[in-house]
Image (cartoon, rainbow, N blue to C red):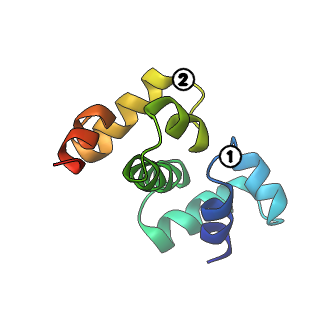
Amino acid sequence: GDVIKYISSHYADDIKIAGLADYFFVSRSKLISDFKKSIGVSIKKYTMFVRISNAQHFLNTGKSITETATLCGFYDNSHFISTFRLLTGKTPKEYCKIRSR
């Protein structure tokens, strides 16, 4: 619960496992293990899901691909585009075209 809330409100930040473990006063291994058991995916994968979900929201509101990437914690457009495609099956540009129909 608390880690999910933290990720949901800090998804644009550079979230590191060590930083999360320190923040929640647990070991890295316990954090990784408990999160995976509880949620079913790794912290990194969950963070990407949250970022891309928020990216879809920003794209739906008319934000540019570059602005959306920055708002969602991606510091490289090509990484954003490849991650978006991996999780949605479409590039952000394709997603915007479909949404604008």
Q: Quadrant of residue 3?
A: bottom right
* Quadrant holding the N terminus: bottom right
Q: In which quarter of the image is residue 53?
A: bottom left
Q: Name the residue under label 2.
A: 76
Residue 76, image x and y in percent?
54, 23
Look at 69% across and 45% down and name the residue there.
Answer: 13
Amino acid residing under circle 1: Ile
Amino acid residing under circle 2: Asp
Q: Is residue 88 above or below residue 91?
A: below
Q: Nearer the viewer, residue 36 or 64?
A: 64
- For label 1, count other residues whose C-alpha is less than 10 Å away and answer few (under 14), some (14-19) or many (20+): some
Q: Nearer the viewer, residue 13 or 45?
A: 13
In the image, taking residue 1 as reference, residue 92 lies left or right, namely: left
Distance from the alpha carbon under mark 2 to that under mark 1: 16 Å
Q: Name the residue under label 1.
A: 15
Look at 58% across and 68% down and name the residue there.
Answer: 34
Look at 78% across and 64% down and name the residue there.
Answer: 26
Q: In this view, does 17 lie above or below 6?
A: above
Look at 52% across and 35% down and name the residue there.
Answer: 69
Asked if the residue under mark 1 is in contact with the one under mark 2, i.e. CB atoms within 8 Å, the reply is no
In the image, taking residue 80 as reference, residue 76 lies left or right, namely: right
Residue 89, image x and y in percent?
21, 41
* Label 1 residue SS: loop
- For label 2, count other residues whose C-alpha is less than 10 Å away and answer few (under 14), some (14-19) or many (20+): few
* Label 2 residue SS: loop
Residue 9, image x and y in percent?
66, 62
Earlier in the chain: of badge 2 and badge 1, it is 1
Q: In which quarter of the image is residue 30?
A: bottom right
